[in-house]
Image: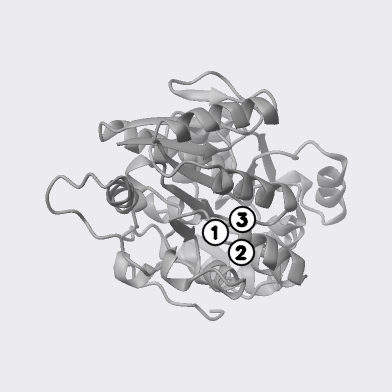
Amino acid sequence: MKVLLVGDYPPPYGGVSIHVQQLHGYLRGCGVEAKVLDIGKGGRPAPDVLPTRSPAHFALRLAGFISSGWTVHVHTSGNNPKSWVLAGMVGGLPGSRSARVITLHSGLLPDYLAESGARRNFARVALAGYARVVAVSTAVKDAVVACGVPEAKVVVQPAFISSQVRPGPVPPVVDAARARRKPLLAMAHHPSPVYGRKQAFRALKLLAETHPDVGLALFGPGTDSEDFIRDARELGVAGRLEVLGELEHPAALGLMARCDAFLRPTTHDGDSISVREALALGVPCVASDVCTRPQGTRVFSAGDEQSLARVVLEAVAAGPAFHPTVDVGPALLALYTELAGAVPGPAIPFKQSRDEAFDTGETRHAAQ
């Protein structure tokens, strides 16, 4: 069995790229011959990670793997035209010896497909060549099935591999922030409004009324932008921010492990890797109620900074608590084995729903 992962690879350290990196590491650790065809910006060299210099170069390399019978697993957001062109290209290449799987990651996908019949038709055709479509949430699955994709081949699996959550050393500034901020909160940042920066800042100002030493550590792209600086000043929290910029993933996990609570105030989500990482590390996690959250997450009413501030205080007061987390690695490995037609004895069946695949106890939380 040989597996080719197609998707972004760090850096930058986004959710899809982190999942591709961790799945690649998991497969290699299992002794599977696995490579990554990196369609992102092409970061530092890594073993068996192949950068693509142009669309033509990508197509040439991809065709070589397909003709050699590799199982191909595409990872993409599904919330923009480029994503669906990629899906259609990989699914449409001839090669009957090569099974194809795709994971659709974005919580914005349902809204994107709902906007036009043309988009839904394109998605249906693009996904026709895949043996399995992996949706990271029920909402993503429902949107795909509504396009006309057979429900039997769409499965729900969170894009998370708990065995790969490994905190690393942190920069000295993190320890300094830990010493002076009580409580110290942390949040993954992105310039997109989907990440809820303004709401986090408003809630931080409310928290400061009763906790004068509170601080918020932010990591990710866009923390040096004019918009970020303006929002911090206008909302009165500039002096309470620990701005860390883009951290390598082990350092980001190290920061998360040192904070009193992790925030995820997003307006949309598929299935957040960072939420599951916080829970796996025993860190209290506060997230918006815009989607199903894993068991142990403390949710607040999206768009309500009063609710966010209140739930943060509840989480900090409750303190650390470890929660069982899923690991999609074994299920994907079983799927690849099944599709390759090389099952060496009893195989783990690839489940057709999240509830069958993992006993996570997840429910759709209402605001708390």
| Rendering coords of residue 76 (x, y %) | 59, 48
Is residue 20 visible in the rendered image? The answer is: yes
Disc 3 to disc 2, C-alpha distance: 6 Å
Q: Which residue is mark 3?
A: 126
Which of these two is toward me, 108 or 287? 108
Are dots 1 and 2 in contact, CB under 8 Å? yes
Crowd tier of the residue under label 3, counting other residues whose Cα lies within 10 Å: few below 14, some 14–19, many 20 or above: many
Kind of residue at badge 3: Ala
Q: Which residue is mark 1?
A: 128
Kind of residue at badge 1: Ala
| Mark 2, secondary structure of its residue | helix
Are dots 3 and 2 in contact, CB under 8 Å? yes
Crowd tier of the residue under label 2, counting other residues whose Cα lies within 10 Å: few below 14, some 14–19, many 20 or above: many
| Mark 3, secondary structure of its residue | helix
Task: Tell me the residue at 23%/44% (across/down).
Answer: 342
In the picture, which quadrant includes the N terminus? top left
